[in-house]
Image: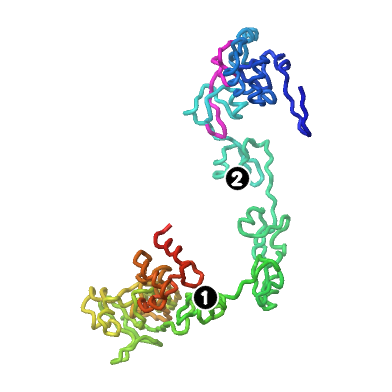
Amino acid sequence: MLCCFGMVLLCTMTPALAGDRDDGDCCYAHPYPGCETPACQEVVCAMDPFCCDVEWDSLCADAAAMYCDCGGSEHGACCVEGECVATNTEPECLAMGGEWYADETCPEFICSGGELGACCVDGECAATTLDWVCYDIFMGEWYPGETCPPFLCPPPLGACCVDGECVATTIEWECNVAFMGEWYAGETCPEFLCSVPLAGACCIEGECVATIPGDECLAMGGEWYPGETCPEFLCPLPLGACCVDLECVATTTEEECLAMGGEWYPGETCPEFVCPLPLGACCIEGECAATTPEDECLALGGDWYAGEECPFFLCPGSTHGMFEVSLDPEGMATPGGNNGWQDPDTGDQWFYYPWFGWWNEWWPNEYTLEGEKWILVEVYVDAMVPGSFIEVAINWARPAWTELGLGRPPLPWDIADPAEEELYIGREVFLYSEEPGAFITFEFYLPFCPEWISIDVRGSYAYVLGDIWHICFPFVYPIGDMNCDGVVNFFDIDAFVLAVTDPAAYAAAYPDCDIMLADCNGDGTVNFFDIDCFVEIIVGP
């Protein structure tokens, strides 16, 4: 019976059509719709139309077994010459010259007469099975008499190509490592025709550097031009966006952009590229706080220095020391141009510490344990004759010295023995040289801001010239730290409530704290809208 609804054609096989088939037993799955018993078919298909529209699968057979008196002859697997050829009745199987196994089904049933073996797929032992199962279902290689595991499948073979020539039929590892070639799975030499990689000119930054295959050129970060050769090929100059007065005016070469007085950004194109605002160092109270655009720096109340970069820019007001000294063959110092601390009694700037043989020059600093000291040293050294040497170190006064309150650096006559020198003075050696001339830049951080910083030198027949910059970065209290103890916890709750309800009282109670630490939601004001995020900071996620 055929039924049409609109553009959809729904067809149901009549019981007679299914019943015409000899092997359409309702109790067994088969790859076509319907079964041989009309009454059973009607019951099952009423519950699952798929059984009559598409295929009488295992679910249909299970339903028939549950709701129908299947009747008919008992079915089983029929094995002919070791192969499971059909699921049918015993008389049908015997008529085919086969052996019949009740309640089994093909192709799942493995006939006892078939030889088993290991089935290898992509070098892995996938299953112990019959040869046809391995070849037809697994699409693998079959090894009779072997079992998975422990059988070790041989690695797959392929053609190995080196410089366009098929040199061997081998495994992938041997081709890639031993021959350094390209491997083609399943192919064999000499039959396989290796492709010769196309060569071309490889251009890097506008220069033709080599005639090589394209993948090699791209791996070098170059532009590849097939069929061209170096050095004859003239590589096009790289292009980029040219920004003039913050406007992207043209996609051009670097030379053309500089001639226009612009800033060039390689690989970018106009007008899509958004020209960035010029950056510079932002100095706040003598400290290089950040590298920012000018308007951001001014909004922070800072002074902006175009083209400079923090933390390396020396802001006006920061500490900058200059030092110069020569050491004779016995290691005695002769000072040059220096700007360090001078002994008010002698005028000396360099002092000799005999316990470890160092000469040093000191510079004063603002002392605080709640900060971080950044130190940058640029130094030129010269061990002037063979056999001479020079060492350079950074020194700082430890808190134990500052707590004595003498207002000057620890001098040699203040130190009675090596242990006392280590108690009062910290030291970091950053340079040892026996070369006739060397220039080095050294950056160093201390977890506090010492009262005194110095440069130390020792050696023989050497010359030292350099600069030292040292800046103290104040400790930054975290948002929510309303009592300014360095941590955010439940002890900040009362201070937060006071800041929100009575700012003047908070300022009086905590004169060294910033009330904006209560601005937890970052909207620029302190009010009740900050309460929820403050609670989140206190209790955590």
Residue 177 in the figure: left or right of residue 342? right
Q: Quadrant of residue 323?
A: bottom left
Find out whether residue 110 is within the magenta segment: yes
Would you call the spot at circle 1 few (<14 residues within 10 Å), some (14-19), or many (20 or more)?
A: some
Residue 286, compared with residue 159, is above or below; it is: below
Specify whether residue 522 is in view: yes
Residue 403 in the figure: left or right of residue 142? left
Q: Which residue is mark 2?
A: 181
Count of marks, rendered view: 2
Find out whether residue 97 is within the magenta segment: no
4 vs 304, nearest the viewer: 4
Q: Which residue is mark 1?
A: 309
Which of the two discs, 2 and 1, sits closer to the camera?
Answer: 1
Estimate the x, y position of residue 321 in percent, counting from the top left: 41, 83
Q: Amino acid at mark 2?
A: Gly
Earlier sequence position, callout 2 versus callout 1: 2
Q: Amino acid at mark 1?
A: Glu
Estimate the x, y position of residue 521 in percent, counting from the top left: 48, 66
For the N terminus, the image quarter is: top right
Would you call the spot at circle 2 few (<14 residues within 10 Å), some (14-19), or many (20 or more)?
A: many
204 vs 191, nearest the viewer: 204
For the C terminus, the image quarter is: bottom left
Which secondary structure, mark 1? Answer: loop
Specify whether residue 81 is in view: no
Residue 286, compared with residue 428, is above or below; it is: below
Estimate the x, y position of residue 535 in percent, counting from the top left: 42, 62
Q: Magenta segment range?
A: 99-124
